[in-house]
Image: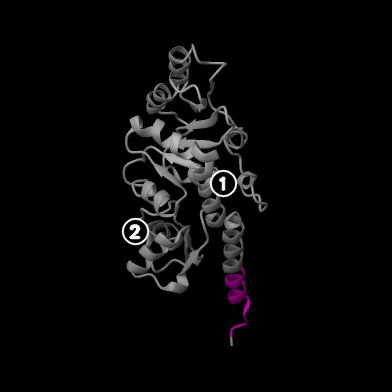
């Protein structure tokens, strides 16, 4: 809350501050400033950490993780199960792309049962390398995109997503009930997210890319029964109303503040 000290106080402004924790689990005590009107907690894990850090229960609002409205349909998303001839996999590694994408793709393309769509993001060098390396498979087994605004459409076409444990992409997938395999996480901020995925049974965590073919085979076996179970878990876990709840809370705080300022002085 140093911003409040150096900006609001210096300007003699009495404005409520609401903090929104932007991750699922790995948060620091820096969020636990008792001067905050509210701290928005996107998970029970973050709420518990704030309680341990000394925040009062009434200051904490558990909402679920907010994602873009396009991913927040209140209707139950249709579950897509693998075609008996192949499984459709979407491989994403953030808007900037990652070299690990190439390693994963090389591991998977040898399986003729896999249809692989790759989003390389803004990393044009990675996209070019992917196109050159995977040229024999493009068209028949592999599709490659650079940056695209149609992420939801690509997710909806897939049976399974392979992603980094980024909370935004992860929770977009969960809102669409798309099973995921997470293959890593950024140090620090995302470090606990793979464990979060496993704990809540939202997908699987692959520590070694060499294990991916076996994990995919297990998920798609028996008509995709394990994929069905993960999608069911995601449906019961997701909170597509999160952004609305957060907005309503902020409006409520603002109205309460305005009401207190309008009271006549006795």
Q: What residue range appears in magenta? A: 255-265
Q: Main secondary structure of the magenta part?
A: helix
Q: Residue at x 55, y 30 (%)?
A: 88
| Image-based side of 205 in relation to 175, left or right | left
**Residue 30 tag number:** 2
**Could you say where residue 106 lies in the image, as x and y percent from the top left?**
40, 21
Q: Position of residue 118 (x, y in %)?
A: 50, 26
Near mark 1 (Cα within 10 A), the count class, few <14, some 14-19 or many ≥20, is many
Is residue 7 rendered magenta in the image? Answer: no
Quadrant for the N terminus in the image: bottom left
Q: Is residue 48 left or right of residue 151?
A: left
Left or right of residue 191: residue 130: right
Please tell me how crowded label 2 is: few (under 14), some (14-19), or many (20+) other residues with Cα within 10 Å: few
Question: What residue lies at 59% left-to-right and 84% top-to-bottom?
Answer: 265
Task: Specify the label residue 177 is tagged with.
Answer: 1
The image quadrant that residue 21 belongs to is bottom left
């Amino acid at each position: 809350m140093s911003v409040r000290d150096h900006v609001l106080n210096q300007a003699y402004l009495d404005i409520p501050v609401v903090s929104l924790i932007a991750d699922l689990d790995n948060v620091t005590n820096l969020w636990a400033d008792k001067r905050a009107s509210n701290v928005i907690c996107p998970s029970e894990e973050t709420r518990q950490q704030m309680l341990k850090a000394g925040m009062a229960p009434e200051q904490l609002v558990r909402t679920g993780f907010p994602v873009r409205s396009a991913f927040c349909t209140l209707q139950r998303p249709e579950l897509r199960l693998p075609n008996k001839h192949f499984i459709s996999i979407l491989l994403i590694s953030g808007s900037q792309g990652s070299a690990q994408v190439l390693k994963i793709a090389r591991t998977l393309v040898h399986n003729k049962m896999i249809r692989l769509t790759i989003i390389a993001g803004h990393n044009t060098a990675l996209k070019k390398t992917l196109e050159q390396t995977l040229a024999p498979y493009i068209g028949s087994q592999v599709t490659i995109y650079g940056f695209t605004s149609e992420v939801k459409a690509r997710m909806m076409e897939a049976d399974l997503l392979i992603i980094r444990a980024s909370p935004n992409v992860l929770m977009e997938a969960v809102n669409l009930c798309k099973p995921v395999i997470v293959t890593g996480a950024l140090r620090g901020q995302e470090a606990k997210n793979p464990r979060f995925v496993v704990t809540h049974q939202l997908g699987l965590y692959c520590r070694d890319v060499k294990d991916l073919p076996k994990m995919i085979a297990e998920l798609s076996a028996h008509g995709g029964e394990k994929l069905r179970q993960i999608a069911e878990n995601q449906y019961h876990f997701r909170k597509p109303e999160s952004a609305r709840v957060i907005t309503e809370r902020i409006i409520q705080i603002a109205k309460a503040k305005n009401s207190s300022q309008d009271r006549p002085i006795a």
